[in-house]
Image (cartoon, rainbow, N blue to C red):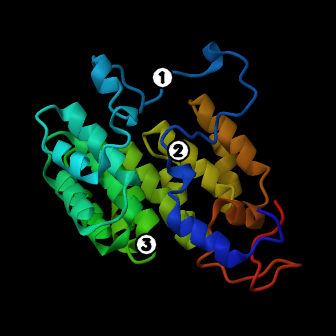
Amino acid sequence: MTCHDDDEEFQKHLEEEPDPQLDPAKSPGIGSDIEALEDIEVSREDVTIGEATPAELAAADTEPVAGDGATSLLADLDADDSVDRRRAALALKDEATTDAVVTGLAQAATRDDDADVRQFAVEALTAHGGERAAAVAVALLDDPDPWVRAEAVVALDNVDRAAHEDEIAAAVDDDHHAVRRNAAISLFKLRGEAMENRLLSLSRDDSERVREWAAHMLGGVDSDAARDRLRDLTDDPATVVRQTAERALEAEPDRFRRQFGALENDARLLPGEDRLNRMPDL
């Protein structure tokens, strides 16, 4: 984002596109200096090894149903095979927004007995936006599957995080690390430095993934307490947390928050900024 970009366009982008920081594969503690696959830690909490069939692994590939159209895809949401339902739900993300599409995805997200279908459906529904998507996401914050709940937080962040701040804040106390992580990221974008105490608490979380992201966001908090905690985290048992803390200590808090997208509750201007152009050249 350069200093010549219009802030209104940037905010529109934030509202329309899910934040890539909420991608569960993204890690602030792993840099670009990895030379081989064996250099990557694989003992991460959110990596599981199961017995998925080739068909299940290909469920996210929508190429087999490309061009089928909304009517056919909506019919596939009632297919007996859960893989077909997953693929249809995800493919509906790219269809035109209609009442039928929104209703079909909402029903799949809340009623299907397959957790992956529910997760894919709320992801697709989010692309169509609106109050229905938000209402479904709020309902799914109580879903029995943690990855559905984590996706529901992403949905609320994308549709209107400010309007659903209370629900997102409650999700920081979820019993699964992916939900806590996503909720903390969304709240930091809303509250900025006001998240300090919460981030300090999350930096002691049992999950190394939560500690990693708490350390990352503490880089945007300009306080002695934040820096002291980051120095402590450079001795964390998890390598990824240590590396994140080391980088966070080098960050410029104001610049970090603007890069991160934590703009809403920070009305101060940096030198050279104006109201129409909040983003510095990063």
Q: Is residue 87 left or right of residue 275?
A: left
Label 3 crowd bin: few (<14), some (14–19), many (20+), radius 10 Å: some
Q: Quadrant of the C terminus?
A: bottom right
Q: Residue furthest right?
A: 272
For disc 3, the marked residue is: 160
| Residue 163 x %, y % | 40, 78
Q: Which of 70 and 112 lies nearest the eye of the viewer? A: 70
Gap between marks 3 and 1 measured at Cα: 34 Å
What's the amino acid at mark 3? Asp
For disc 1, the marked residue is: 43
On the question of residue 265 being in view, the answer is yes
User: Dividing the picture into quarters, in which one does residue 241 lie?
Assistant: top right
| Residue 182 x %, y % | 45, 53
What's the amino acid at mark 1? Ser
| Residue 34 x %, y % | 71, 23
On the question of residue 198 being in view, the answer is no
Disc nearer the start of the sequence (2/1): 1
For disc 2, the marked residue is: 211
Disc nearer the start of the sequence (3/1): 1
Gap between marks 2 and 1 measured at Cα: 15 Å
> Please, what secondary structure does the residue beneath circle 3 have?
helix
> Please, what secondary structure does the residue beneath circle 2 have?
helix
Residues marked 2 and 3 touching at CB (< 8 Å): no
Residues marked 2 and 1 touching at CB (< 8 Å): no
Look at 27% across and 18% down and name the residue there.
53
Look at 22% across and 46% down and name the residue there.
72
Disc nearer the start of the sequence (2/3): 3
Look at 35% across and 72% down and name the residue there.
130
Label of residue 264 in the image: none
Between marks 3 and 1 in the image, the one whose residue lies nearer the viewer: 3
Between marks 2 and 3 in the image, the one whose residue lies nearer the viewer: 3
